[in-house]
């Protein structure tokens, strides 16, 4: 059973936020290019990525677990 994650409001919002955030981070100084901005970009894209990954799971329980990872990802909690 697969879920159409692209229809989820939370996915749409997280992608819009990631897009806006990428634009903001691009204005950071060059010396932050491989430091803070890189880490922030990975964190912000992890939410929609986890939602998309979870949609490919076969069971509702796996999907729910993957969705909970999306909520915890930006803070680094597991």
Image: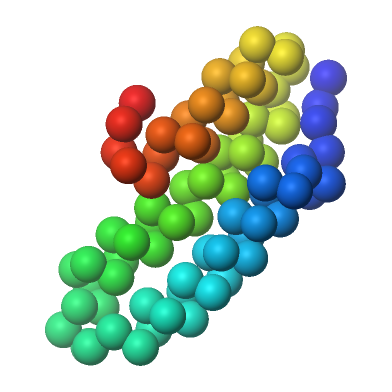
State the image coordinates of residue 4 (x, y, percent, origin top left).
83, 38
Quadrant in the rendering for residue 56? top right
Relative to 20, is 27 on the left or the right? left
Rendered residue at 22%/67% (across/down): 36
Is residue 51 found left or right of 76 in the rendered image? Answer: right
Which residue is pictured at 31% across the width and 31% down the height?
A: 77
Q: Position of residue 75 (x, y in %)?
A: 32, 42
Point out residue 39 in the picture as x, y percentages from the top left corner.
29, 59
Residue 54 lies, with reference to residue 76, above or below; the image says: above
If the image is split into quadrants, where does the C terminus sit?
top left
Q: Find residue 31 and report its image quarter.
A: bottom left
Instruction: Give above or below for 2 relative to 8.
Output: above
Instruction: Establish if 59 lies above or below 71.
Output: above
In this rendering, the count of numbered labels is 0
Colouring: rainbow
Work out whether residue 68 or residue 46 is closer to the camera in this orientation and state it. 68
Quadrant of image for the N terminus: top right
Q: Residue at x 55, y 39 (%)?
A: 50
Is 70 on the left-hand or right-hand side of 78? right
Q: Is 72 displayed left or right of 56 in the figure?
A: left
Residue occupying the point 23% across, 88% down: 29
36 shown above or below 49: below
């Amino acid at each position: 059973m697969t879920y159409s994650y692209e229809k989820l409001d939370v996915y749409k919002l997280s992608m819009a936020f990631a897009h806006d955030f990428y634009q903001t981070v691009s204005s950071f100084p060059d010396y932050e290019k491989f430091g803070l901005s890189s880490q922030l970009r990975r964190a912000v894209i992890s939410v929609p990525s986890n939602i998309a990954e979870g949609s490919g799971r076969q069971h509702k329980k796996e999907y729910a677990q993957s969705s909970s990872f999306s909520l915890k990802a930006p803070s680094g909690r597991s």
